[in-house]
Amino acid sequence: MKKSIGARAFDIFNISLMVFICLTVVFPFVQQIVISLSPSNESGEIGLHLFTSNPTFDSYTQIFATGSILEAYYWTILRTVLGTVLTVVVSAMLAYPLSKRYLLGRKMWMGLIIFTMFFGGGLIPTYLLVKELHMLNSIWSLVLPGLCSAYTIVIIRNFFTSLPVEVEESAYMDGANDFTIFFKIVLPLSTPIIATITLWSLVGQWNAWFDAMIYISNGEIKVLQILLRDVLNNAQDAAMASVRGGEIVDSSGQNYTAESVKAAILLVTTLPIIMVYPFLQKYFVKGIMIGAVKG
């Protein structure tokens, strides 16, 4: 069956638009990669940077030589793993009983949860609460305040509602209790929504910086995003080297510009979390669609 001229024109337009969107997404990464690999006489030039004639890893060498980036990686990975695991487990355990119609006061509990989607305590009361709980300058101040969100609970609860009740009833008849059913039956059947929430939490925890700026004041805990913010604001890390004109020169004779250092740090902090997407992408659409329309 031949396509009409209008259908062909639409296909050409659609493909061209998708290619253009892909290029707009890929280009900034290519630009930053090239700048981070460019020597000082190229990285400081104004304009497009699509290739470099003399690639060098001096910027990356200097970044990792300071040790601050490795420490920031440690705190960011710890925060991301701890926050994601706790968020997924606690949110799922809260959503599971709310998915049962026989739960006493079910509508009231859901109403209280949804209420928090529209009204919050505010920054100052939240800070005072964290302070009174003695969590300032600790990793828990970055994990516990945002542990659960109403939207996440509603999405997981809707997914649990879509699961067949007969599976749980047969497990009850075999003598299984609620915890056994939840961990051995419900969670394995909920891989799409668990993967979706895991992806949300991973990205949120990895990119978070405002709470670290508010709750951490002693400088002992510095996540990657705070380090990136400092570098972008100061144009260079004061601990790296001395500044001579527009170039940074260290004791080994390596030279690079502040722009190449900023591009290198930007890539170092961004690429790891981007690499997680391909492993969870196949579950993402299914999880979000079922969780959004059921219940």
Image (cartoon, helix red, strand yellow):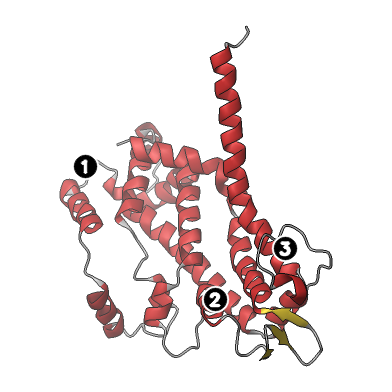
Q: Give the numbered dot on residue 147.
A: none
Q: Quadrant of residue 231?
A: bottom right
Above-or-below relation of 83 to 139: above
Camera-nearest residue between 7 and 189: 7
The residue located at (58%, 80%) in the rendering is 235
170 and 165: which one is in front? 165
| Disc number placed over residue 102 in the picture, else none | 1
Which badge, 2 or 3, is on the more N-terminal residue?
Answer: 3
Of badges 1 and 3, the one in the foreground is 3
Looking at the picture, how far across and down is residue 184, in whole percent?
Answer: 47, 47
Write down the residue under mark 2: 232
Give the residue number, with chain letter if any, for mark 3.
34
Compared with 15, 83 (above or below) is: below
Q: Residue furthest right?
A: 54
Q: How packed is label 1: few (under 14 Cα within 10 Å), some, or many (20 or more)?
A: few
Three-letter code, disc 1: Tyr
* Residue 9 shows up from this direction: yes
Given contact means CB atoms under 8 Å apart, are the residues at marks 2 and 3 in contact? no
In the picture, residue 83 is in which quadrant? bottom left
In this rendering, the label closer to the viewer, 2 or 1: 2
Amino acid type at image mark 2: Leu
Task: Say which quadrant the N terminus sits in.
Answer: top right
> Percent position (x, y) of residue 293?
34, 35
Q: Given the image, on which type of amino acid does mark 3 rest?
A: Val
How far apart, in angstroms, are the residues tagged by discs 2 and 1? Answer: 54 Å
